[in-house]
Image (cartoon, rainbow, N blue to C red):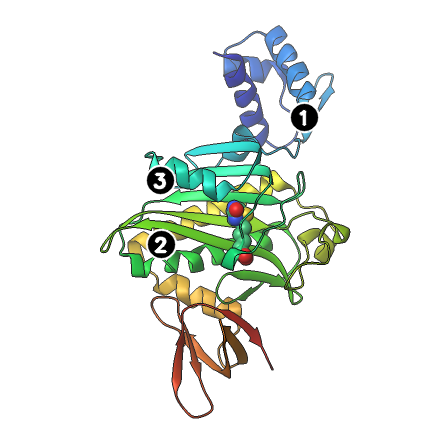
């Protein structure tokens, strides 16, 4: 067994059991000597794992380092379709750009690219996505769904629902979805999505789901140039979010929802999106380029467009733009 496999085996046994695992149990399960177990504990501690050792009881994992590494993120992931391969970078211009290039070169479905920092994080409509190191999640996932290009925007709704579920699972704050792809907490943006696609007329070659979540960014890191008010889950909830745990939860939710999407279509995801967004029946102001209008939201069509009823009774189908609630 290679050194890294022994490390992984030890961490796996810690995760399976609660509390202490004896040196003897570890040595038996992993087929290595007690001395080897002891040496690996030393190595794991040097990597930032906080491991308690108590005579006659054994070892207990108290805390794992909040470092985004493939090993930490992949441990225990269901990875039916998403997360079979995870690439973690210290810094890159944009994880979307890296994932897009990988996909062009044949990168497999479910490949995940994560960076600790981005030097040119891309937001929607050509905006910049603030991406300082050590605090947030910047993640891009390659998908190769057997769908037509017009249906690809449904994947945006899938990703938004996955982020909302992960926020609920990892924090005490209540996420709210804003059309088409924002997650707000108390009216401020905490996460955004930028999906990019390579397609032919009839067929999607691949989609890159780009997800940015402000986890532990502090208020003074946002600067004053943002177009919309933004916050982080830490600022909103007062508790640091473990980045590894968040990334794993998000990838597991994406995996579940993607499975549902492929088997049952977009309808179940659309209904969860509608329920969570609480936008139906609300008055909104819509800005599409030069054009602005107001109306009441009636729902989403099967392609993710927002259906807005104007005061003259006409139904507008909004495919892109900025939407804000007015009552
Ligand atoms: C938005 O404007 O709301 C979309 C923001 C998307 C940001 C994420 S961070 C990971 C991925 N890489 C990028 O360059 N952008 C997306």
Q: Position of residue 40 (x, y in %)?
A: 62, 14
Residue at the (34%, 38%) spot, across then down: 104
Report the residue marked by disc 3. 109
How packed mark 2 is, by other alpha carbons closer than 10 Å (few <14, some 14-19, many 20 or more), is some
Residue that protrudes farthest toward the front in the picture: 290
Residue at the (34%, 55%) spot, across then down: 261
Please tell me in which quadrant of the rendered image residue 37 appears.
top right
Report the residue marked by disc 1. 49
Res. 260 mark: 2
Confirm whether residue 175 shows in the render.
no
Residue that protrudes farthest toward the left in the picture: 202
Q: Is residue 301 left or right of residue 7?
A: left
Please tell me in which quadrant of the rendered image residue 138 appears.
top right
Instruction: Describe the element under mark 3 as helix, strand or loop.
Output: loop
Res. 170 mark: none
Q: Position of residue 214 (x, y in %)?
A: 63, 50
Q: Is residue 51 left or right of residue 168?
A: right
Q: Position of residue 94 (x, y in %)?
A: 52, 42
Q: Earlier in the sequence, mark 3 or mark 1?
A: 1
Instruction: Describe the element under mark 2 as helix, strand or loop.
Output: helix
Q: Nearer the viewer, residue 211 or 81?
A: 211
**Mark 1 to mark 2: distance in Å?**
36 Å
**Mark 3 to mark 1: distance in Å?**
31 Å
């Amino acid at each position: 067994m290679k050194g890294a496999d022994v490390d992984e085996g030890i961490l796996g046994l810690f995760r399976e059991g609660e509390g202490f695992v004896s040196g003897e149990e570890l040595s038996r399960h992993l087929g290595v000597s007690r001395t080897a177990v002891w040496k690996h504990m030393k190595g794991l501690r040097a990597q930032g794992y906080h491991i308690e050792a108590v005579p006659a009881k054994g070892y207990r994992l108290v805390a794992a380092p909040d470092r985004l590494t493939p090993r930490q993120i992949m441990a225990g992931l269901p990875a039916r379709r998403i997360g079979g391969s995870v690439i973690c970078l210290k810094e890159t211009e944009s994880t979307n750009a890296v994932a897009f290039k990988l996909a062009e070169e044949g990168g497999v479905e479910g490949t995940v690219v994560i960076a600790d920092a981005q030097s040119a994080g891309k937001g929607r409509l050509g905006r910049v996505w603030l991406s300082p190191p050590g605090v947030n999640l910047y993640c891009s996932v390659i998908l190769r769904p057997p769908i037509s290009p017009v249906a690809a925007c449904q994947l945006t709704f899938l990703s938004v629902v996955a982020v909302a579920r992960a926020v609920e699972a990892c924090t005490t704050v209540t996420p709210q979805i804003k059309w088409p792809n924002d997650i707000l907490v108390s009216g401020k943006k905490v996460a955004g999505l930028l999906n990019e696609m390579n397609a032919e007329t009839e067929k999607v070659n691949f989609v890159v789901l780009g997800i940015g979540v402000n986890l532990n960014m502090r208020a003074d890191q946002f600067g004053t140039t943002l177009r919309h008010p933004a916050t982080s889950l830490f600022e909103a909830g007062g508790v640091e979010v473990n980045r590894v745990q968040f990334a794993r939860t998000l990838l597991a939710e994406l995996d579940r929802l993607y499975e549902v999407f492929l088997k049952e279509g977009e309808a179940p995801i659309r209904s969860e999106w509608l329920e969570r967004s609480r936008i139906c029946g609300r008055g909104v102001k819509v800005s599409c380029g030069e054009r602005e209008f107001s109306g009441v939201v009636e729902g989403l069509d099967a392609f993710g467009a927002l259906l807005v009823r104007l005061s003259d009774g006409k139904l507008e189908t909004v495919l892109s733009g900025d939407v804000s609630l007015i009552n």
